[in-house]
Amino acid sequence: MAKKPKNPTPGRPVRGSTTGKPIMALLDLLGQRWALRILWELRDTALTFRALQTACDGVSPSVLNSRLKALKEAHFIEATPDGYALTTLGKELQEKFGGLYQWSEKWAAELVRQP
């Protein structure tokens, strides 16, 4: 019998959803503590475990290990000779963040203008 992945995966119920829809699995995975931050820190270059830990404000080694494993299982990152790096799929996801980042800046400016 094949071992079920314990990380959010399309086709399986996830936090907040029993449908198994891919978007819900993605949001559950990215909603885990430190997952987005790790992807963000890898946006420009590969980082070693220690460099990534430092870039993530000293996240604990056990949490970092757990998130790296989940992001590798999701095919968003990979281990390279230079450290951890985004995969092609991870880079595509990072591009999607670009529009969300721009929108968040607009939102923040709006909140400042109209409290």
Image: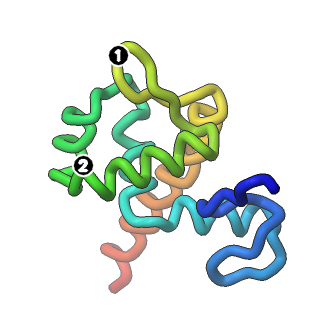
Q: Secondary structure at mark 1?
A: loop
Give me the residue at 41% from left, 54% from top.
66
Q: Residue at x 32, y 51 (%)?
A: 64
Return the residue found at the far front: 1
Which one is in front in this view, the residue at disc 1 or the one at disc 2? 1
Count of picture labels: 2
Q: Counting residues from the N terminus, which is met first, the one under dot 1 or under dot 2?
A: 2
Residue 83 in the image: above or below residue 11: above
Q: Amino acid at mark 1?
A: Asp
Q: Residue at x 21, y 56 (%)?
A: 60
Residues packed near mark 2 inside 10 Å, few (<14), some (14 to 19) or many (20 plus): some
Amino acid found under the numbered disc labelled 2: Cys
How far apart are the alpha carbons under marks 1 and 2? 18 Å
The quarter holding residue 112 reads bottom left
Q: How is the image coloured?
A: rainbow
Find disc 1 in the rendering and name its residue.
Answer: 82
The quadrant in which the N terminus is found is bottom right
Tell me if 9 is positioned left or right of 58 in this view: right
Q: Which residue bears the numbered disc 2? A: 56
Q: Nearer the viewer, residue 110 or 39?
A: 39
Q: Position of residue 111 (x, y in %)?
A: 37, 76
- Residue 97 x, y percent position in the rendering: 55, 47
- The correct choice, above or below, for 8 with respect to 44 in the image is below
User: For residue 109, what is the image quadrant?
Assistant: bottom left
Q: Is residue 45 above or below residue 27?
A: above
